[in-house]
Image (cartoon, rainbow, N blue to C red):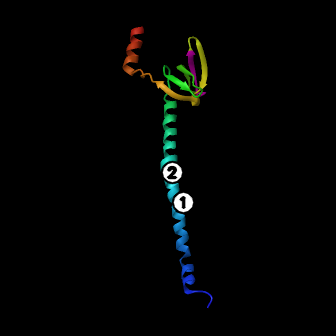
Amino acid sequence: MLISPAYAQAAGDAQANGLMSFIPLVLIFVIFYFLLIRPQQKKMKDHKAVLEAVRRGDRIVTNGGVIGLVTKVIAEERQLEVEIADGVRVKVMRDMVNTVLSKTEPVSDKADKAEKDASK
């Protein structure tokens, strides 16, 4: 006989062995998801929330490194008017804001009403 019985037994077990070689690939994908993909998605979601919350009076840094003060928010065009020096105002796309350095506190309704009553 040219074929030994040991080879015949290994051929029936090849299907289970193929499944075992696929498990490390799945494990690597799961590790990449939790260490790379998920944190990046969370960071993008937080950055988008910060961009949506930019309002007049905030100090920002653009992607180009320019620091300025937001003087006007143009919501329809997703633009901000930013004062980068005394009397120098530029329009910046909202998506080009990198960081918000300092946030201004929103005016409460009570303070807003008192301000209007005082001006009358």
User: Which of 13 and 81 lies nearest the eye of the viewer?
Assistant: 13
> Which residue is rendered at x = 51% and y = 47% of the image?
36
Where is residue 87, by image quadrant? top right
Q: Quadrant of the N terminus?
A: bottom right
> Which residue is rendered at x = 48% and y = 44% of the image?
39
User: Which of 70 and 12 lies nearest the eye of the viewer?
Assistant: 12
Residue 90 position, x and y percent, is 61, 19
Dominant SS in magenta: strand
Q: Which residue is mark 1?
A: 25
Residue 20 position, x and y percent, is 51, 68
Q: Which residue is mark 2?
A: 33
Looking at the rendering, the stretch of residues picked out in magenta corresponds to 76-84
Q: Furthest-bottom residue in view? A: 1
Amino acid carrying label 1: it is Leu
Considering the numbered disc 2 on the image, is that residue within a helix, a strand or a loop? Answer: helix
In this picture, is 41 found above or below 13?
A: above
Whether residue 30 is in magenta: the answer is no
Residue 9 position, x and y percent, is 54, 82
Amino acid carrying label 2: it is Tyr
As drawn, the label of residue 6 is none
> Which residue is rendered at x = 53% and y = 77% of the image?
13
Work out whether residue 120 can be spotted: no
Foreground mark, 1 or 2? Answer: 1
> Which residue is rendered at x = 54% and y = 29% of the image?
98
Of the numbered discs 1 and 2, the one sitting upstream in the chain is 1
